[in-house]
Image (tube, rainbow, N blue to C red):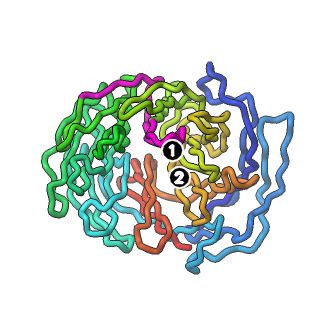
Amino acid sequence: MKPRVLLALLVSCTPTDPGSSDGDSDGETTSTASGSTSGHVPQTSSEPTTSSTASTTTSTTATTDDSTTGPVAACGDGVRRPGEFCFAPGRHLPTGPRPVAVAIADLDLDGHDDLLLADFDAGDLTIQTGDGGGQFVAGPDLPTFLRPRDAIAVDVDGDGRLDLVFADPGVGLVGVYRHVGPGLVYDPPQPVKAGSEPRALAAADLDDDGLADLAVADEAGDAVLVLLNAGGGEFADAVVHPVGDEPYDVIIADVDADGRLDLVSADQNQARVTILLSDGPGSFVDAGQRFVNPEPRRLVAADLNLDGLLDLATASFTADHLSILPGLGGGEFGEYIPIVLGEGLYAVIGADLDGDGPPELVAVDHTRGELVVIAGLGVQDIVSIARFEIGAGPMDLAAADLDGDGALDIVTADAFGAGATVLLADP
């Protein structure tokens, strides 16, 4: 699949006005120039791509033209090159009427990655079992309580098998399917009270007892809930940590590099992220908020410039840009940097697609039905942006090596496409 390749000059900016909700910024932004939409085989330059770029002090944008130079690398030759992003034509997997979340994991313990999708309209979890070569077949459908918005695979009872956890906002519950095996056999889902409207999930050992705990974004409750594992797949009552208005996502990462896991929420109604720093096993303190793009939906923590510090990035559904908060250490972040991509971004992850070390940011554009790859962040003056056609209305994505060739592949949950798109790397 050939991408539409864009170039952008990365420049600094000032944060969004705290009183603004329309996405306007008083500082400079990063602007892109688009090339032509393409067909099915990506071809990008094996050398650093250049562009005639002009910046102006009287405008808030820096622009690029459409010209590029340098030899064209051949996708499909089996050689991974820095800056080369190649995928075979996307393959549609029918899963259900409206998949809104996707996770990749070896659910049946056969050594091959499988897919877990949460389907909002069908009200169930759907499983696609992988064969290790990038092919999938439909597995069981597991009912939820009402309509799930997120799902993850994590061993909550410590038996070495991955269990399934889903967020069901309509009933204020998190559900836990314990894997009792063999294959894909689960106990009935255990309900866990999780605030008013649990929307997003993350899991890790937050209290150093060797068991996976849960962090939950409670959208209607304006809080992040911490559910500590009590053993045997049971959870203690939620500890409530107030955050900003309508948290849409939560991640777990050591953002201050002190060896303890912290929490970060994306507060979509305030154009902010809230930092909750760990101050002991299972305990967190509010370290304040940072302004990002309006209506952040999903966020990711990744060391984009390989300086040993985690940076944050958020996808915005209504603003025309993705925001990057550069990590400064100690849980502090610099002023946010916007990358102009157009409205409709829904989810973002970090993944080193070309094998050059620093991760790229990979997002889904819900409006255009495209995968967006942003490369060169923090290590180059020129940022390259590539877009690939996927299914309609994507809302989530995940990356893993699905066919064992050493390159990361991508799966998207296409809410308006009634299925998932599998993009296998084709270097």
Is residue 384 visible to the viewer in this orientation of the structure?
yes
Q: Name the residue that disc number 1 marks.
A: 300
- Up the image or down, 402 lies above or below 221; here it is below
- Up the image or down, 387 lies above or below 75; here it is above
- Name which residue type carries label 1: Val
129 on left or right of 295: left
**Magenta highlight range:** 237-262
Pick the front one: 146 or 129: 129
Magenta segment includes 248: yes
Magenta segment includes 321: no
- Quadrant position of the C terminus in the picture: bottom right
Secondary structure under tag 2 reads: strand
4 on left or right of 107: right
Find residue 182 and report its horizontal and vertical position in percent: 15, 63
- Name which residue type carries label 2: Gly
- Up the image or down, 254 lies above or below 351; here it is above
In terms of image quadrants, where is residue 46? bottom right
Q: Are marks 1 and 2 in contact (CB under 8 Å)?
A: yes
The count of marks equals 2
Find residue 382 and report its horizontal and vertical position in percent: 74, 54
Secondary structure under tag 1 reads: strand
272 on left or right of 399: right
